[in-house]
Amino acid sequence: MTEIESAVLVFILLLAATGLGAIVRPLLPEEHKAQETVQLIQLLVGCW
């Protein structure tokens, strides 16, 4: 796989993840979208 093919594959996967997130987010319960939950996830992701 060439570098361009790899880059295109990563780009497509990122677009697919963004689209899936846009579809799933409205379906989540409010407790998963609360500000405290968002801050916790941001903290955990920032630690990695």
Image: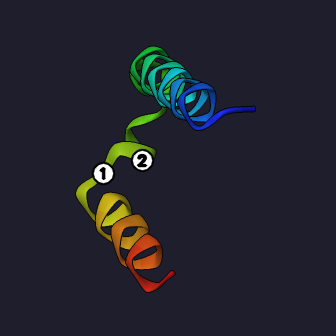
Query: What residue occupies the far bottom of the structure in this picture?
Result: 47
The front one of 5 and 34 is 5
Determine which of the numbered discs, if any, sits on residue 34 in the image.
Answer: 1
The residue depicted at 42 percent of the width and 47 percent of the height is 31
Q: In this view, which residue lies farthest toward the left?
A: 35
Q: Secondary structure at mark 1?
A: loop
Say left or right for 35 vs 31. Answer: left
Q: Which mark is residue 46?
A: none
Is residue 48 positioned above or below 23 on the image? below
Image quarter of residue 10: top right
Q: Position of residue 37 (x, y in %)?
A: 38, 61
Q: Quarter of the image holding residue 1?
A: top right
* Point 53% across, 24% down: residue: 8
- Which residue does the image show at 61% across and 25% down from the upper left? 5
What is the basis of the colouring in this image? rainbow
Label 2 near label 1: C-beta < 8 Å?
A: yes
Type of the residue with mark 2? Glu
Q: Which residue is under mark 2? A: 31
